Image: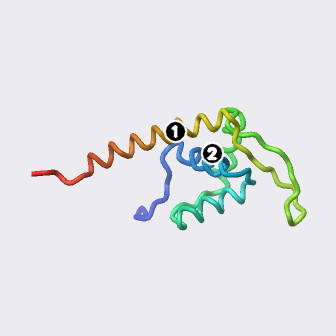
Amino acid sequence: MPSRDRKDLFPGALEMMVLRALSQEPRHGYALVQHIKRTSNDLLQVEEGSLYPALQRMLRAGWVKARWETSASGRRVRVYAITPVGQTRLEREVSNFERMLEGIRLVLAPVKS
């Protein structure tokens, strides 16, 4: 039986959330996962198996850049930052999403008699 609490994201949602998080500050992968979980009040769980392929796609597209750093615990981590191209992409995707959401809201609104 399928779960009634599905947390699947629509296409492009993960990239939009990652770009928004990176527009606030550069982050490594685990920090991105935690940020999305925390800011969604635990409603969204991003799996590393989804995050890292998305980050690779965004690197290839030029939306993010990455550099190696040493974490506070002494581990090497890859830190991602949004690029100007990524910022433009984010703005366009958020605008498209807001229009789509408004359309859905209108369709779902109670019918006026």
- What quarter of the picture does the N terminus occupy? bottom left
Please name the residue shown 53% across and 67% down the image. Answer: 41
Please name the residue shown 50% across and 51% down the image. Answer: 9
The reply, left or right, for residue 82 in relation to residue 7 is: right
Residue identified by numbered label 1: 93
Please name the residue shown 86% across and 64% down the image. Answer: 72
Examine the image and state in which quarter residue 61 appears. Answer: top right
Marks 2 and 1, how far apart at CA: 10 Å
Q: Disc 1 residue type?
A: Glu
Crowding at dot 1, Cα within 10 Å, few <14 / some 14-19 / many 20+, comes out as some
The local secondary structure at tag 2 comes to helix
Q: Disc 2 residue type?
A: Leu
The local secondary structure at tag 1 comes to helix
Q: Earlier in the sequence, mark 2 or mark 1?
A: 2
Asked if disc 2 and disc 1 are in contact, CB closer than 8 Å, the reply is: yes
Q: Residue furthest right?
A: 74
The disc placed on residue 19 is: 2
Crowding at dot 2, Cα within 10 Å, few <14 / some 14-19 / many 20+, comes out as many
The reply, left or right, for residue 24 in relation to residue 7 is: right
Closest to the observer, 49 or 1: 49
Q: How is the image coloured?
A: rainbow
Closest to the observer, 1 or 102: 102
The disc placed on residue 75 is: none
Q: Residue furthest left?
A: 113
In this view, 18 is above or below 95? below
Could you say where residue 22 lies in the image, as x and y percent from the top left? Answer: 67, 48
